Image (cartoon, grey):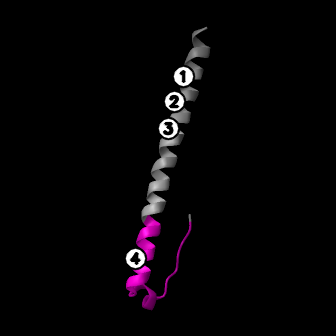
Amino acid sequence: MCVLVVPEEMKQSKEYTEVFEAYWKEQQRDRVELVAAERGQDRSFLNMVKKSTKQ
């Protein structure tokens, strides 16, 4: 996890707000895509385990 420390005067800047919100949206989208990819890997692994235990 990363912590961003921002001075108060920057927080009041409209430009900072726009840039940060764009960054945050991209991070959220990346996280959603990563979770979806991990779920796919988990399903594949579980299917492999189920097949190997049926034999």
Q: Position of residue 52 (x, y in %)?
A: 62, 15
**Circle 4 sits in a helix, a strand or a loop, which is it?**
helix
Q: Nearer the viewer, residue 53 or 42?
A: 42
Span shown in magenta: 2-24
- Asked if the residues shown at circle 4 and circle 2 are in contact, with their CB atoms under 8 angstroms apart, the answer is no
Label 4 sits on what residue type? Glu
Q: Position of residue 35 (x, y in %)?
A: 49, 45
Label 2 sits on what residue type? Arg
Mark 4, mark 2: which one is toward the viewer? 4
Residue matched to label 4: 18
Residue matched to label 1: 47
Q: Position of residue 38 (x, y in %)?
A: 53, 41
Residue matched to label 3: 39
Q: Residue 34, labelled with which disc?
A: none
**Relative horizontal placement of residue 16, taking residue 54 as reference (left or right):** left
Q: CA distance from mark 4 to mark 1?
A: 44 Å
- Asked if the residues shown at circle 3 and circle 2 are in contact, with their CB atoms under 8 angstroms apart, the answer is yes
User: In percent of the image, x 55 and y 26: which residue is there?
Assistant: 46
Q: CA distance from mark 3 to mark 1?
A: 12 Å
**Circle 1 sits in a helix, a strand or a loop, which is it?**
helix
**Circle 3 sits in a helix, a strand or a loop, which is it?**
helix
Q: CA distance from mark 1 to mark 2?
A: 6 Å
User: In percent of the image, x 43 and y 69: which residue is there?
Assistant: 22
Residue matched to label 2: 43
Label 1 sits on what residue type? Asn
